């Protein structure tokens, strides 16, 4: 059975959990070696010193004051000193750091000390031969045994827990937008336009969401253009095909040179339509950039179109030359077709950062609410769709698509003196 890959959240959470477990273990080892054990050894040494000093003091006291001293030791320090047999025949109760206490007592007394205990009692006892007396000293481990510093351990554990929760929260903030983007990408792949991703959060995720939203819109536009393209092909080709079929049927009975000429013209119209559709389809791929003089290219196009050209200084750019040429040609043809037969002006503005190609006409212009719509495929202000009055409606669509594909900008605007101004902006 194939094992399913873990999600990014699961992988990151598991990695962080393992990292924090290792960190916690290392922190506990450091705290134990640098804090708990040294404190336990010093406390054990202090207890051993107190027991030995108390035994030596007891020996030096007059017999009549020893009982009072024993009571004072019991009251203040919980220590017992006696010469009586307390019945400590069993091993002492196990408690933390017993080895450190026995080692400290052995160093202080000069003899190996093994703590013993009374069955059923919590005290630990040891024998101390001092000044000819066999003293027995006892203490309660719960009072003297060094307990691990729970506060330090709690801080380590709490810090690791908070760090883990914080890391998981941050990871979730990253994985949730990515999961949302993945779902949106599936919708785009299915031909749907998902809701825009929220462009919030870290800069990288916000930029990813912004670019994804742009991509989703462009993909949807491409799908719409494809649908429109197919609809336009079926619509625009149907009329010349019908005329061609009619002429061919009539030629069966009465050959006529005029009908043959009309059939040839219909075929030419069909070829022109198909060429326009193919040209629009090719605009989805950027052209390889080359370095050339934009002013020289515009001069060549002006001569071909019969436009006046005042000349311009050299303007070197690095771009797709054929794409620039196609855009300018389409803008010039559009200006000549809708400029009312008035002169068309071609100009170039070149700065350090931007090259602007400007095509101006003196026609009727375009209503402001239509300036963006005319860039849609097959959208025409002249609604007859006749070839003689307006072409196929693909010229400006090709201009916009080529500009967007190559990272340029193209815009239309009405001139204050009348007419339309088309501007192509190419970063240098």
Image (cartoon, grey):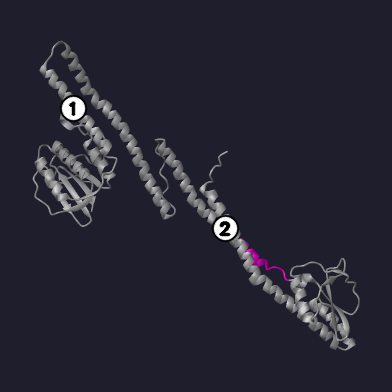
Q: Residue at x 53, y 49 (%)?
A: 9
Is 156 contained in the magenta span?
Answer: yes
Is 299 contained in the magenta span?
Answer: no
Pointer 1 or 2: first along the chain? 2
Q: Quadrant of residue 253?
A: top left
Q: Residue at x 65, y 70 (%)?
A: 33
Q: Quadrant of residue 64?
A: bottom right
Q: Nearer the viewer, residue 384 or 388?
A: 388
Q: Residue furthest top?
A: 253
For label 1, the crowd category at 10 Å Cα-Cα, with few meaning under 14, some 14 to 19 and many 20 or more, is some
In terms of secondary structure, where does tag 1 sit?
A: helix
Labels 1 and 2 touching (C-beta < 8 A): no
The chief SS type of the magenta part is helix
Q: Nearer the viewer, residue 205 or 364?
A: 205
Can residue 361 be seen? yes
- Span shown in magenta: 146-157
Q: CA distance from mark 1 to mark 2?
A: 71 Å
Residue 182 position in % (x across, y down): 45, 43
Tell me if residue 57 comes above or below residue 244 in the rendering.
below
Judging by the rendered image, the residue that carries numbered circle 1 is: 269
Can residue 155 be seen? no
For label 2, the crowd category at 10 Å Cα-Cα, with few meaning under 14, some 14 to 19 and many 20 or more, is some
Camera-near label (1 vs 2) is 2
Q: Residue at x 65, y 65 (%)?
A: 153
Residue 241 position in % (x across, y down): 22, 22
Q: Is residue 186 left or right of residue 120?
A: left
Q: Quadrant of residue 278?
A: top left
The numbered disc on residue 19 is: 2
In terms of secondary structure, where does tag 2 sit?
A: helix
């Amino acid at each position: 059975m194939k094992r399913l890959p873990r999600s990014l959240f699961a992988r990151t959470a598991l990695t962080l959990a393992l990292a924090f477990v290792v960190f916690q273990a290392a922190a506990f080892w450091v705290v134990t070696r640098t804090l708990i054990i040294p404190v336990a050894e010093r406390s054990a040494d202090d207890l051993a010193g107190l027991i030995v000093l108390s035994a030596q003091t007891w020996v030096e006291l007059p017999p009549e004051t020893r009982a009072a001293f024993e009571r004072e030791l019991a009251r203040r320090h919980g220590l017992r000193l006696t010469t009586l047999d307390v019945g400590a025949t069993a091993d002492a109760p196990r408690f933390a750091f017993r080895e450190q206490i026995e080692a400290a007592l052995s160093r202080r007394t000069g003899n190996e000390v093994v703590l013993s205990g009374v069955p059923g009692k919590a005290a630990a006892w040891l024998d101390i031969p001092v000044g000819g007396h066999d003293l027995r000293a006892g203490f309660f481990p719960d009072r003297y045994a060094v307990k691990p510093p729970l506060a330090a351990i709690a801080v380590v554990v709490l810090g690791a827990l908070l760090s883990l929760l914080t890391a998981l929260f941050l990871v979730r903030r990253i994985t949730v937008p990515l999961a949302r983007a993945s779902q949106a990408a599936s919708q785009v792949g299915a031909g749907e336009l998902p809701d825009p991703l929220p462009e919030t959060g870290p800069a990288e995720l916000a930029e990813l969401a912004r670019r994804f939203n742009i991509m989703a819109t462009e993909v949807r536009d491409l799908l719409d253009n494809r649908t429109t393209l197919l609809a336009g092909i079926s619509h625009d080709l149907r009329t010349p095909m019908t005329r061609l079929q009619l002429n061919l049927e009539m030629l069966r009975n009465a050959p006529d040179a005029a009908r043959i000429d009309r059939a040839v013209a219909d075929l030419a119209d069909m070829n022109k339509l198909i060429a326009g559709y193919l040209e629009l389809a090719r605009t989805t791929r950027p052209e390889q950039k080359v370095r050339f003089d934009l002013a020289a290219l515009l001069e060549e196009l002006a001569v071909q179109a019969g436009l006046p050209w005042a000349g311009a200084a050299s303007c070197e750019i690095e771009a797709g030359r054929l794409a620039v040429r196609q855009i300018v040609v389409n803008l010039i043809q559009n200006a000549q077709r809708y400029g009312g037969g008035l002169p068309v002006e071609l100009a170039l503005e070149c700065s350090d950062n931007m090259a602007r190609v400007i095509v101006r006409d003196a026609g009727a212009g375009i209503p402001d609410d239509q300036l963006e719509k005319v860039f849609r495929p097959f959208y025409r202000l002249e609604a007859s769709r006749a070839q003689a009055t307006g072409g196929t409606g693909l010229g400006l669509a090709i201009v916009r698509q080529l500009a967007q594909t190559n990272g340029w900008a193209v815009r239309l605007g009405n001139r204050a003196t009348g007419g339309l101004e088309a501007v192509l902006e190419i970063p240098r």
